Image (tube, helix red, strand yellow):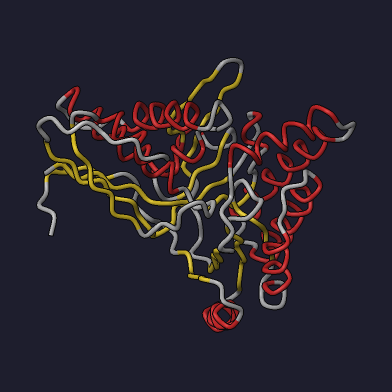
């Protein structure tokens, strides 16, 4: 049985700006989606809605079983992880050789773009393929991974070494809709005087984040996360529930912001140590939210022949 697995992700900074070709930072999380594949005879995919049905058609005539602990519609890369895992299977069967990460990330991006009606960037599929952490359009030549183009835009991806800092992820429980949120931001950018100014300020914030990470400046990074959140709010990327979570996290976190498209989804917070991380986890549980701590250095895509237990 062919088994393909990819991690979820958070965006530390740069969501929405990255759609326009600007900088962004993403980190893989230790939650994964796994596709188990076996041959099937004449069973054609059914008419279920959603990405799973799309993938069944994409991989036909193979039958797939999907197992995941990545929360769906939470801004944590569940759809990107599925696109990457499915693309890896198709590439593996087509060439019958070791997978090529750049080709898989690009093909998964094509799937994401088609499914989201053209409103996507290749950041999610790249981080779910590579794992660890990546920076878009800003990095050392030795850390270069690959480049992905679409129309008049391009994205160059670089590996980014992240310190072992404590980042809390809180699922708001409000499903986000990436397509709708990207379209809403596009409207703000195109129809307001200062719309693009917010995008450019987010790009500058991400550049400063890289400096804070390289200098291991936890306080500075937290401040920049909060600044990024303010710019996202100016782009109307918000929800009353995520706003409330952000207010809760400010008590214990150096910085906090949404991660992903917004309009629901998840919130992240940067904390100093295990003590404060546990305080946040207890607080979120008290208010009925699912929260967990991010581990850095998570491996990316894997594909192998194995037996499903």
Camera-nearest residue between 218 and 300: 300
Snapshot quadrant of residue 125: top left
- Number of dots carrying numbers: 0
Camera-nearest residue between 278 and 75: 75
Snapshot quadrant of residue 217: bottom right
Tell me which residue sits at (38%, 26%) in the image.
107
Query: In which quadrant will I find the N terminus?
Result: top left
Question: Which residue in the rendered view is the most extreme toward the front?
Answer: 47
Tell me which residue sits at (30%, 30%) in the image.
57
Query: In which quadrant will I find the C terminus?
Result: bottom left
Judge from the rendering whether residue 264 lies leftward or rightward of residue 309; answer left or right: right
Tell me which residue sits at (67%, 62%) in the image.
242
Question: Which residue in the rendered view is the most extreme toward the top?
Answer: 151
Judge from the rendering whether residue 54 lies leftward or rightward of residue 227; answer left or right: left
Give percent across and percent down for residue 234.
Answer: 81, 47
Judge from the rendering whether residue 131 lies leftward or rightward of residue 269; answer left or right: left
Give percent across and percent down for residue 69.
Answer: 36, 60
Give percent across and percent down for residue 10.
Answer: 52, 53
Camera-nearest residue between 305 and 162: 305
Give percent across and percent down for residue 271.
Answer: 60, 72
- Is 190 placed above or below 133 here? above
- Is 40 placed above or below 176 here? above
- Is 303 placed above or below 286 here? above
Judge from the rendering whether residue 192 lies leftward or rightward of residue 228; answer left or right: right
């Amino acid at each position: 049985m062919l088994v393909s697995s990819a991690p979820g992700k958070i965006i530390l900074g740069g969501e929405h700006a990255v759609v326009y070709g600007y900088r962004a930072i993403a980190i893989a999380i230790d939650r994964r989606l796994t596709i188990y594949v076996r041959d099937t005879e004449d069973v054609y995919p059914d008419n279920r809605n959603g990405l799973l049905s799309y993938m069944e058609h994409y991989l036909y005539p193979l039958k797939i079983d999907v197992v995941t602990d990545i929360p769906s519609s939470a801004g944590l890369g569940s759809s990107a992880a599925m696109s990457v895992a499915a693309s890896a299977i198709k590439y593996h069967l087509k060439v019958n050789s070791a997978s090529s990460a750049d080709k898989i990330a690009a093909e998964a991006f094509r799937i994401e773009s088609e499914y989201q009606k053209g409103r996507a960037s290749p950041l999610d599929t790249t981080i779910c393929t590579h794992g660890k952490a990546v920076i878009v359009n800003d990095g050392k030549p030795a850390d270069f991974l690959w480049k992905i183009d679409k129309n008049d835009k391009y994205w160059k991806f670089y590996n980014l070494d992240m310190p072992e800092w404590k980042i809390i992820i809180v699922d708001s429980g409000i499903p986000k809709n990436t397509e709708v949120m990207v379209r809403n931001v596009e409207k703000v950018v195109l129809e307001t005087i200062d719309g693009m100014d917010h995008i450019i300020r987010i790009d500058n914030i991400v550049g400063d984040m890289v400096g804070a990470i390289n200098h291991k400046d936890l306080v500075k990074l937290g401040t920049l996360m909060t600044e990024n959140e303010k710019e996202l709010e100016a782009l109307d990327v918000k929800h009353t529930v995520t706003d409330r979570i952000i207010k809760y996290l400010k008590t214990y976190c150096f910085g906090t912001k949404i991660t992903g498209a917004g309009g629901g989804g998840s919130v992240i917070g940067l904390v100093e140590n295990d003590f404060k991380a546990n305080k946040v986890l207890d607080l979120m549980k008290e208010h009925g939210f699912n929260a967990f701590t991010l581990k850095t250095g998570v491996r990316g895509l894997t594909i192998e022949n194995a037996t499903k237990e």
